[in-house]
Image: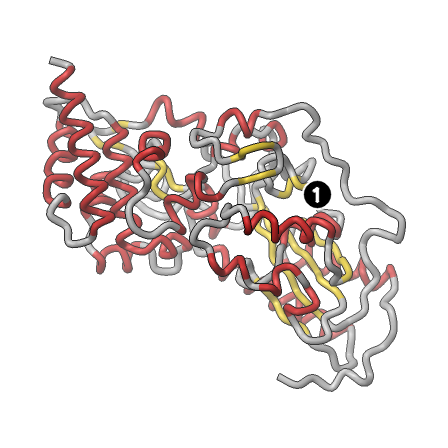
Amino acid sequence: MAWDLRHNRGMGTAEDTQWIVEQAKETGFDLCGVVRAERFPELEQFREWLERGYAGEMKYLEDPRRQEPALAMEQVRSIVVCALNYNTAHPYSTEAAAHHAVRDGRSRGWISRYAWGDDYHEVLWTKLNALEARLRERFTEAFAARAYADTGPIAERIAAKYAGLGWLGKNTLLLNEHLGSWFFLGVILTSLELAPSLAPGDIPSADLCGNCRQCLDACPTEALTQPYVLDARRCISYLTIELRGAIPQEFREAIGRNVYGCDICQDVCPFNRNVPVGTVANFEPRGTSTEKSLLEPGLEWLAGMNEEEFREVFRGSAIKRTKWKGMVRNACVALGNARAAAGTEEYGKAVAVLTRLTGSADAGIKTSAEWALSRIQKEAADSH
């Protein structure tokens, strides 16, 4: 789209930026900041990270626009960064895992906290568009704007750092002293020349991680190869969502009962211990029955669902990204780790669904089902 920007005014004032922050909060965001669309220092290291192969199969990360914000939108000058709290009052995976892996005669899986409710992309998009509409009411000259709800070629967490929203933690996520890391990031790119939230000479939020390394030590697959460096190929979130085909055998046991994403490095972070509960009802867990709730769903249910049921259950959910094959594959692996006791109802259900899936035409599902079935049958035999 061609934009007539000849009448764009000069640099916005600090009052303009404060107004934007206030409007973002009225729209429902918890944090907001403004930063110039520049090549941030961390982006210089991104190419090396890609060259190490740490992105795995995520080829979209190789888009050159991710390393140069000016390429993401023609004539972009400023980035408005917004954060939305998605925390709920429910337990963390590290709190629940020891007690609820098997409950009510069913083996239980774990879905990452951010995916329990409605698709966060849509929730963010609605709020970002509402904020953009307010910008157009205040700034009446012609200007370009484009909202990205974790959908565009932008390193949101890096832009957020330089917009004053937090620091990049050792688990590579943006951390905020008061909101921890339980928030989504969305951005509005604009041709408006806005005053940055941080004045010239100001430094971004101080890194408060200190000597803490709880996230590194807790990661079951050692995906955090060193502080601030993630090898996505080892990350449970990558393995259960982005990876197609079979999950490498070396990681299957470490995946535990995670069927979509992983919260462990966030669950153990000290800054997430007292995060306030968010106010967006869309992020509460879906599901009305005990087995089919997205908070600790029944593994036999997930493994046994067909494509039509998958589409129905996860319509309007971020979980659709893993696709039906990925979810069934993940549920098989989790069943293999559930270690249901021989002779119990859940053991019989697990054996039945896994036996059926060993005949799957999909290699990823077939391999995972065979591995899981062999694992639980061997454990049952060894227990006698």
- Above or below — where is 320 with respect to 102? below
The residue lying at 52 percent from left, 33 percent from top is: 265
Would residue 167 be found to the left or right of residue 320 on screen?
A: right
Q: Where does the N terminus fall, quadrant-wise?
A: bottom right
Residue 125, image x, y percentages: 55, 63
Q: Position of residue 195 (x, y in %)?
A: 84, 61
Query: Residue, x 61% and y 67% (percent of image)?
Result: 147
From the image, tell me which residue sits under label 1: 166
Placement of 204 over or under 193, stated as above or below? above
Looking at the picture, tell me which residue is in the foreground, 122 or 329.
329
**Percent x, y of residue 190:** 71, 70
Where is the C terminus found, in terms of image quarters?
Answer: top left
- Residue that appears at 78% across and 81% down: 141
Q: Horizontal and vertical percent for residue 120?
A: 49, 55
Q: Nearer the viewer, residue 132 or 356?
A: 356
Colour option used? secondary structure
146 horizontally vs 316: left or right: right
Q: Quadrant of residue 36?
A: bottom right
Q: Nearer the viewer, residue 115 or 231?
A: 231
The amino acid sitting under disc 1 is Gly
Give the class, few, some or many, for how many residues have Cα within 10 Å of label 1's Cα (few <14, many ≥20): many
Q: What residue do we see at 85% from left, 77% from top? A: 9
